Image (spheres, rainbow, N blue to C red):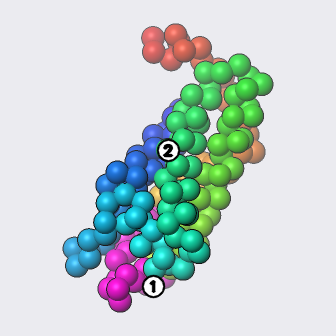
Amino acid sequence: MLRVFAGVIFIFLGQVKFFDSIHLGTDAIVLPRGPEGFAVYLSAIGVPFPLFNAYMVCLVEVICGALLMISPFLPQRFSTQLTRMTAFPLMVDMIVATLTVGVPNAMGHPVRVHDIAVTAQPWRLPLEVSLLVISLYLLLKPLPRFRLSPLQAFA
């Protein structure tokens, strides 16, 4: 269930960045939709090559989130490798998000876009830390205690 929970959250976060506009803490600024808008946000926090990294984050969250969700239904050897291969980039994603946005926001230093504070969002840090811990856990312990076949999962 942990893989499915994390996978759903990552897919949701990635698809919002891909097809919509990220949620800001103010209505004073509206970012463009898609990775271009997310790149504006990444540029504001000082991420190099913001457009390239915006696409990378979107792809990592959607693809790795989906693969993380299907990994428990694969044979054990493939499940272990796929879980580790998807958990690592998701963990890196959450480390960057926590250090560049979550912690500074919690300490009263929101991200500023065009000199307007846009991330006065108390929910960010707990979500980012939770996803970081889950990704780290899955990286270190990729096998569940019990395994479900696809038929058992839907019964």
In the rendered image of this protein, does residue 34 appear above or below residue 1? below
Most frequent secondary structure within the magenta stretch = loop
In the image, residue 42 lies at what x, y percent? Answer: 48, 72
Residue at 70%, 42% (x, y): give it: 85
Labelled disc at residue 32: none
Residue 131 or residue 74, whichever sits in front: 74
Instruction: Say if the magenta span includes residue 116.
Output: yes
For residue 95, which quarter of the picture? bottom right
User: Circle 1 sits on which residue?
Assistant: 109
31 vs 12, left or right, is left
Task: Give the extent of the magenta segment.
Answer: 107-126
Q: Is residue 97 visible to the viewer in this orientation of the structure?
A: yes
Q: Which residue type does callout 1 highlight?
A: His
Q: Position of residue 21 (x, y in %)?
A: 32, 60
Between 84 and 2, the one lying in front of the other is: 84
* 8 is higher (above) or lower (below) than 88: above
Which quadrant is the C terminus positioned in?
A: top left
Let me know if residue 75 is in the magenta part: no
Residue 70's place in the image compared with 15, above or below, is: above
Residue picked out by circle 2? 62
Relative to 19, is 102 on the left or the right?
right
